[in-house]
Amino acid sequence: MVAIANLALALSAFVKTLATPVFEVSEAASNDLPDFEVGAANLARRQDYTQNYRTGGNVNFQSTTNGYSVTFSGAQDFVVGRGWRTGSSRTISYSGTTTASSGTVLLSIYGWSTNPLVEYYIQEYSNNNGAAQGSKLGSFESDGSTYDIWKHQQVNQPSIRGTTTFWQYISVRRDMRPNNGTITTANHFKAWADKGMKLGAMNYQVLATEGWGNAGGSSKNTISAS
Ligand SMILES: *[C@@H]1O[C@H](CO)[C@@H](O)[C@H](O)[C@H]1NC(C)=O
């Protein structure tokens, strides 16, 4: 899918900046003070992930204290979001509103692992097919809905390790949640592993709003994790 390829290209542009010292990038990229993820067992720095990638149209993105806000119209490929520099099996909650008036819009937990190199999505909402592509391998229940599992190979596509061939693991929630939800990522990682879809060392992990194809709409979320 061209849109996904372009999305990956967008992300590879972002990842190149990650190759430089992370906190330099984080602080330069955000006007916010550092945020912290507060949990019973940890106090970890929240990644200040700020991206305003676009290939056309209007995409107005803002990082906020505990999340982000974006409005868009006539937009070609873009991805914006907020999360953590290092992914984990954290449980992630979000609250806000995502709307779509045209094009394709999706809201997902989005991340990467290395060894093996994997790009993954836990899609909570899309007005169209969104991230789903490749082979449907099954389904499972989590957080009040059925999710369908997809696996798709990207061949010679940009990635966080340059242009290469890698898998995408995709969970697509049937009972879509454009407004709020809690995602037990551990359930997805286990369901994928049960299908032989193993992750490696965790790279970044975010809640992301993506759009392409003359996308119009808005997305505003606060994010927390445990
Ligand atoms: C969460 O979303 C549901 C469905 O749109 C809505 O009814 C509910 O009010 C929302 N809850 C909060 C706390 O925003």
Image (cartoon, helix red, strand yellow):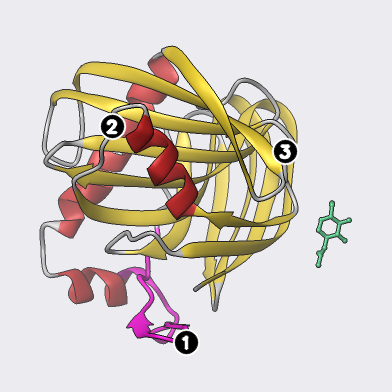
Secondary structure category for the residue under label 3:
loop
Q: How many marks?
A: 3
Q: Is residue 43 above or below residue 88?
A: below
Q: Left of 71 or right of it: where is 4? A: left
Secondary structure character of the magenta stretch overall: loop
Secondary structure category for the residue under label 2:
helix
For ligand 1, the image quadrant comes to: bottom right
Q: Which mark is residue 176?
A: 3
Rendering quarter of residue 112: top left
Q: Which amino acid type corresponds to the residue marked 2 in the rendered image?
A: Leu
Q: Is residue 44 above or below residue 95?
A: below
Please report whichever mark, 3 or 1, sits nearer to the chain's N-terminal start.
Answer: 1
Secondary structure category for the residue under label 1:
loop
Please report whichever mark, 2 or 3, sits nearer to the chain's N-terminal start.
Answer: 2
Q: Which residue is found at the position 35% from the left and 47% from the top?
A: 111
Query: What distance separates the C-alpha of mark 3 from that of mark 1?
Result: 29 Å
Is residue 74 visible in the rendered structure shown here? Answer: no
Magenta highlight on residue 46? yes
Mark 2 and mark 3 in contact? Answer it, CB < 8 Å. no
The quadrant the N terminus occupies is top left
Magenta highlight on residue 214? no
Mark 2 and mark 1 in contact? Answer it, CB < 8 Å. no
Q: Which residue is found at the position 60% from the left and 64% from the top?
A: 93
Q: Which residue is found at the position 39% from the left and 73% from the top?
A: 30
Q: Which amino acid type corresponds to the residue marked 3 in the rendered image?
A: Met
Q: Mark 3 or mark 1: which is in front?
A: 1
Q: Residues within 10 Å of mark 3 (few under 14, many from 20)?
A: some
Query: Residue 185 placed where, x, y %?
Result: 47, 53
Q: Which residue is found at the position 16% from the left and 49% from the top?
A: 16
Q: Which residue is mark 1?
A: 40
Q: Which amino acid type corresponds to the residue marked 1 in the rendered image?
A: Ala
Question: Which portion, as a residue range, is magenta?
Answer: 29-50
